[in-house]
Image (spheres, helix red, strand yellow):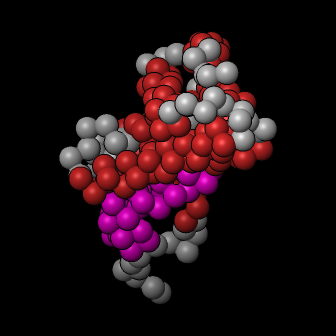
Amino acid sequence: MVTGQRGRPRSFDRDAALDKAMLAFWERGYEATSISDLTASLGIGAPSLYAAFGDKRKLFDEVVAVYGGRYTDFARAALAEEPTAGEGLRRVLREAAGIYTDPAHPPGCLVISAAVNTTSQEVAQALRERRDANLEMFERRIRADVAAGVLPAGTDAHALARYALAVLVGMSQQSRDGASREELEAVAELAMGAWPR
């Protein structure tokens, strides 16, 4: 007879645990999600959590990587697949409206909402770098359109990229405040009215 068994149970499903941790961080943010919140969500004890993922920060980093692959690659695809930056952004905003308000998970964007009120400079910096990567992606696509003559030669690609990201961030927060998909789609259409022609 085996007694005093320690560690993770044999049935431990790492992917399922990451999904549960993602929902906890997405709902509460990094700072407000405690180890006890995580162990309750995952259905494991703290020693098992540490054995499986290391500390809270390492678990969060892994969650953000999974989240990125599942919920944010749509922007990269839209900008690559659409014929212009403007059409790409229109698609990004419309798809974001659907993702941010999907009842299958918490509203908004985890990368945006998890950074709110965090006192960890390391977490804040890591999330800022992810947002900055999106800014650079938008700016590269806009610059390509300027070079191709699709956008006017005097277009400020950096400011326009910053505008696109500001709209996305605002839509994320609005969804957390209860805005519907239809309302966010209307915001997206209004935002595109400012796009240079």
The answer to whether residue 75 of the structure is visible from this angle is: no
Residue for point 56% across, 56% down = 66
User: Is residue 41 placed above or below 105 in the rendered structure?
Assistant: below
Which residue occupies the foreground of this view, 38 or 62? Answer: 62
The answer to whether residue 140 of the structure is visible from this angle is: yes
Q: Which quadrant holds residue 188? A: top right
Magenta span contains residue 51: yes
Residue for point 51% across, 48% down = 136
Which residue occupies the foreground of this view, 19 or 126? Answer: 126
Which residue occupies the foreground of this view, 172 or 26? Answer: 172
Q: Position of residue 124 (x, y in %)?
A: 31, 49
Q: Position of residue 26 (x, y in %)?
A: 45, 41
Q: Which residues are magenta?
A: 41-70
Magenta span contains residue 131: no
User: Is residue 104 placed above or below 61 in the rendered structure?
Assistant: above
Left or right of residue 47: residue 21: right
Residue for point 42% across, 38% down = 112
Q: Main secondary structure of the magenta part?
A: helix
User: Is residue 95 placed above or below 12 in the rendered structure?
Assistant: above
Q: Position of residue 89 (x, y in %)?
A: 65, 32
User: Is residue 12 placed above or below 17 in the rendered structure?
Assistant: below
Q: Position of residue 119 (x, y in %)?
A: 21, 47
Question: The C terminus lies in which quarter of the figure?
Answer: top right
Residue for point 68% across, 39% down = 145
Identity of the residue furthest to the front in this view: 153
